[in-house]
Image (cartoon, helix red, strand yellow):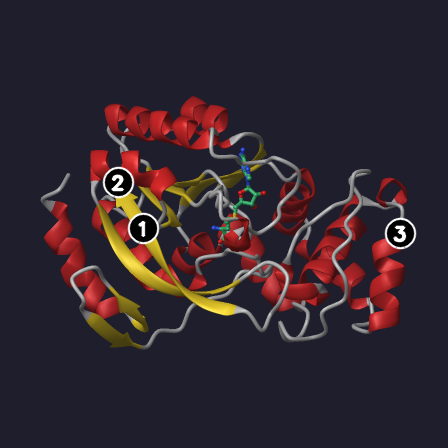
Amino acid sequence: MRRAHSARRQQHKGLHTNTVLLNRSVSMNISYSCPMSFLRWAGSKRQLVPILSSFWYAASRDDGRSRYVEGFCGSATLFFSIRPKRGLLVDCNAALVECITRVKKAPRSVAKALGQMAPSEATFYDVRAADTNQLDPDVRAARFIYLNRLCFNGLYRTNSAGRFNVPYGGLKAGRLPDVRQLENASEALQSTSVICGDFQSAVKHHVERGDFVYLDPPYAVRNRSLDFQYGPDVFGTKDIERLALLASEIDAIGATFVISYVDCPEISSLVERWGCERVQVRRTVAAAASRRVSASEVLISNL
Ligand SMILES: C[S@@+](CC[C@H](N)C(=O)[O-])C[C@H]1O[C@@H](n2cnc3c(N)ncnc32)[C@H](O)[C@@H]1O
């Protein structure tokens, strides 16, 4: 698969838009328009969409029928940018998976419910306080989008009772998605399954020869200042071993994988086994939007 590497590099020159600093100290200035997910997600790889999509284009079949699989989908930024003809999205966050599924099935109904939620601080706390068990699934999906777009930094965090507890962050993410945007997302999702589950079992169970698998786990580094919070203990340093096992299984099946991860000692065994490209990203760290740091990220692939 490594022969495809130089072809991918060629494509990737044409695609770029952000400044990406590769480990060969090459700096590229590029401009692209990235179709947005209807969600925003702490840790989403929006900045890396050009380089990540170049892996997809190099790995996909000429007939455009390759399947896109994502094991930690979050807001599925890369998926919505590529809009593959067939896909599988996996995440362990049940509320997120329900939201994406309802947008796929009933975008108008979700948009209607969302339109009834005023984008203000007072409404935010009312919506946040609602008992989700009492809500219709489409209203629950609208509530998820509303809180996601208006909360602090697009974080997803729950208390010990499982209740979303991120504070109001304002309208920094722009207007709430309208019916046209949700219909557009629904169209992109039509031939894609969305599964709630653990990345390892779900991907291992479903992956097939020729698939493209993108894995973007939360950072399980010991330096917690780089951490985003997705829930208690969802991905720890021990899970990196499971990630490494899954990468070998995907390769053995004849599929392509790309893993994005913070450049840290914990990931070194995967880097040594498969090689990597290093890219610089701007990252907002956990508690304060003012604390933006430039950090090195590794892209590990069998391509
Ligand atoms: C860095 S985010 C992914 C961001 C995504 N690439 C995007 O475009 O928004 C990591 C995601 O992994 C999910 N996650 C954490 N542990 C998981 C596990 N064991 N299995 C599946 N998903 C998991 C979290 O719920 C979170 O949505």
Question: Is 39 on the left or on the right of 71, as rendered?
Answer: right
Report the quarter where the N terminus lies: top left
Amino acid identity at mark 1: Val
In the rendered structure, are the residues bearing label 2 and label 1 in contact, judged by CB atoms less than 8 Å apart? yes
Marks 1 and 3 in Cβ contact (< 8 Å):
no
The total of numbered circles placed on residues is 3
Which of the two discs, 1 and 3, labels the residue nearer the N terminus? Answer: 3
Image position, residue 173 (x, y; %): 62, 72
Q: Say which residue label 3 marks.
A: 130
Quarter of the figure with residue 6: bottom left
Residue at position x 42%, y 68% from top? Answer: 34
Q: Name the residue under label 2.
A: 271
Mark 3 nearby-residue class (10 Å; few <14, some 14–19, many ≥20) = few
Q: In the rendered image, is residue 54 in sight? A: no
Indicate whether 159 appears above or below 289.
above
Q: What residue type is labelled 3?
A: Ala
